[in-house]
Image (cartoon, coloured by chain):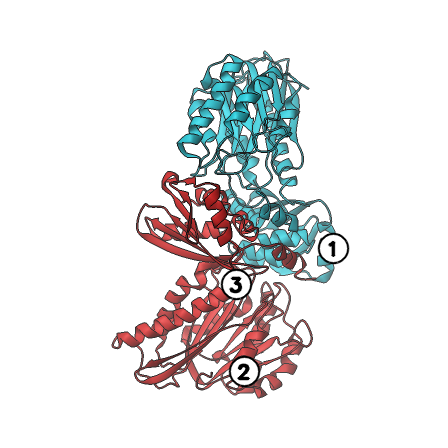
Chain colours: A cyan, B red
């Protein structure tokens, strides 16, 4: 599918390795309303700092993105490089430099290979075509093993409105506003305040609910561009049905991409949902689910397909949330394994171990202390995670 | 060496596995001033709950400890079992039940094997001897690969005063008051308030500064017993030199045991000190050092002997402490690798990679923002960690 008046391109620029797609460009025929969320890390990469500044105008026309180098912790030289790459793209596209958003992913600390950008810019821009979105999704992969995209078509005020989204991310994943990188384009007609609000609330419930390894990146960002080419009525409070459908669609795309990141977590063999219910407050449910989801002992037990609920309750105990251990129930899938804080014995553990052989697993924790319920999405922790990360740079 | 009027014994009771030492007893000829610190986890094992209650009297005469079963999340049955094992020991020793502290380590959720305790109690008490301390240290091992003990002899007011300490711990280690289990006995004469104060301040600077995997156990405890058999003058404010020497000695023992736990961290191949200096406040330095020490990406890079400082600065960025990334220096051993927030290039990375081939490594982070300095001790994160924890119960 295509999204009207959006074009994409990717080329092997040789930024770090030869002969692999590593430089991508997404651009709109006209300036697009653009909203973004960025890493909360105090250490922000140069492109993140530049994009935040430029997005104050709520508009962008192009996203230039590279893998192979994060351009983080690169000082003034890194900031100059980020600006220069955006200038190269702007000149080739014939648009103002400030309308280009830049994004980088890869090793922290290395400077951008400017020669690669200079020589690749002409073929990159020449290659722009409506159907090249997947090629950009491939160009932004690092330790990712699969391309992560999501598509939707909806009808708003009688007009067909299209969405395309992409994400990358596999390690250093516990987003604290956004994941590593995700870009969504739509031809919907929507103003900046509405788009921004939709994005922020969607990110909270999707990318901010996943964790692979508890580490937050310096380069996290989600950008959504809406160029209005669909010609639908402006989405605002006056047409609440359209507003709700747009919000649901955007959130659906972000959740699909977020779960694809978890499924492709470094070394992951399983996708795990940690659901905490019966909490007094939603933020307590989230905090407990996040602590369990980040526990190495819990995650290695999942890898070993061991229904080791003791590690779950140990993580709950240290998470900082007050609860009553003697009234907690824990289930793996449909199998109740802990009732009122004590184990139900060998038969239920054996049944639970069968659940753990599946690829998608839900752990449900009931605190019986209130009505709040939250989920965190994570993956298991395998030998390959260590192999990947002990060898990443070599 | 021996500590006057302390006796120890260990037997293979068959609590979980046959033919391995799994039940230990330490006792003093006379009631000993005893102080303890216990896990801050909301989920406390039965023996922890029982010991906290009994230690309000500031006295104990024996410690009964088993491996193979944590007696955690075992409900009322578990509490009754903890009390019954203490009663069995008290009867065999001819002392009041309330003078027995109990400790358990092993899998969470299983009930104690009471038959094993009943049949083993007589040989256990019969075997008491001054020189059996190391046998108890062996009996409390689970995934530990080495016995962890520490010994000191000092002179206080002209009297020889002896200390013996033991600890166990290898996984589920980020103590939040105490490590998994540690017991220290001394024949020093000291009152409860002084002993308690010494222990608490020592634990803060030793066991509470280590982390293997960021997980806190339900069974953590440190107990120190002082039976006064050395006949030194009472240690209090009136003899500050003795007080200081006692404090330093106790802290030295705890630090030696804490570092032995890190060195024997599950799957560990290296011991790593993360030192943050130049912070505004000590708790900020600690928080940053702890976040870096707990990062899986940092720990796997150490395992891979990769001087990947980008992962260190990424962890710093998400730790919640405000600092100025552009003025940070980072060194591996004596090798400066990051100066004012940017990398010093390939030559310094290669020199740093040589440092990483050593067994003991110090990473120094200078924030240049104040005078506070704190250290956290940790280990690397290897393929064997995952293997150990995926297979632990099988």
Against B70, residue A69 (above or below) is above
Which residue was labeled with disc 2?
B132
Q: A227 or B147, which is in the foreground?
A: B147
- SS under mark 3: helix
Mark 3 nearby-residue class (10 Å; few <14, some 14–19, many ≥20): many
Q: A345 or B157, which is in the foreground?
A: B157
Q: CA distance from mark 1 to mark 2?
A: 44 Å
Q: Residue at x 68, y 56 (%)?
A: A306
Against A187, residue B2 (above or below) is below
Residue A379 quadrant = top right
Mark 1 nearby-residue class (10 Å; few <14, some 14–19, many ≥20): some
Q: B110 or A371, which is in the foreground?
A: B110
Report in which chain the residue with disc 1 lies.
A
Q: Is residue A80 left or right of residue B218?
A: left
| Label pair 3/2, CB-CB below 8 angstroms | no
Q: Can you give x and y, in whole percent of width and height, for residue A280 in the image?
A: 51, 47
Q: Can you give x and y, in whole percent of width and height, for residue B243 in the image?
A: 31, 74
Residue B154 quadrant = bottom left
Badge 3 or badge 2: first in the primary sequence:
2
Q: Residue at x 62, y 23 (%)?
A: A10
Q: Residue at x 70, y 62 (%)?
A: B394
- SS under mark 2: loop
Q: Is residue B255 visible?
A: yes
């Amino acid at each position: 599918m295509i999204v009207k008046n959006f074009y994409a391109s990717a080329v092997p620029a040789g930024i770090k390795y030869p002969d692999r797609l590593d430089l991508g460009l997404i651009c709109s025929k006209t300036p697009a309303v653009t909203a973004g969320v960025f890493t909360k890390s105090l250490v922000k990469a140069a492109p993140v700092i530049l994009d935040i500044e430029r997005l104050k105008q709520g508009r962008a026309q192009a996203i230039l993105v590279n893998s192979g180098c994060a351009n983080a912790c690169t000082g003034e030289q890194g900031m100059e490089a980020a600006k220069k790459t955006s200038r190269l793209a702007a000149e080739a596209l014939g648009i103002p430099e400030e309308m280009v958003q830049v994004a980088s992913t890869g090793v922290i600390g290395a400077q951008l290979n400017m020669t690669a950008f200079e020589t690749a810019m002409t073929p990159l821009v020449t290659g722009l075509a409506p159907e090249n979105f997947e090629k950009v999704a491939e160009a932004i992969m690092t330790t990712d093993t699969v391309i992560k995209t999501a598509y939707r078509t909806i009808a708003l005020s009688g007009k067909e409105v299209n969405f395309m989204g992409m994400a990358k991310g596999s390690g250093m994943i516990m987003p604290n506003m956004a994941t590593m990188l995700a870009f969504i384009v739509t031809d919907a007609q929507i103003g900046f305040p509405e788009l921004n609000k939709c994005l922020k609330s969607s990110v909270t419930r999707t990318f901010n609910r996943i964790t692979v390894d508890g580490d937050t990146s310096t380069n996290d960002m989600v950008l959504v561009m809406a160029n209005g080419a669909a010609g639908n009525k402006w989405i605002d409070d006056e047409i609440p049905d359209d507003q709700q459908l747009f919000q649901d669609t955007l959130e659906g795309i972000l959740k699909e991409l977020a779960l694809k990141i978890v499924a492709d977590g470094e070394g992951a063999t399983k996708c795990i949902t940690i659901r905490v219910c019966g909490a007094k407050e939603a933020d307590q449910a989230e905090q407990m689910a996040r602590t369990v989801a980040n526990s190495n002992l819990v995650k290695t037990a999942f890898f070993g397909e061991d229904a080791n609920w003791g590690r779950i309750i140990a993580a709950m105990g240290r998470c900082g949330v007050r609860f009553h251990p003697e009234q907690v129930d824990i289930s793996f899938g449909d199998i109740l394994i802990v009732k009122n804080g004590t184990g139900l014995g060998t038969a239920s553990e054996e049944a639970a171990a069968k659940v753990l052989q599946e690829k998608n697993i839900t752990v449900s924790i009931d605190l019986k202390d209130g009505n709040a319920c939250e989920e965190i999405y994570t993956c298991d922790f395998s030998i390959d995670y260590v192999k990947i990360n002990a060898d990443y740079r070599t």
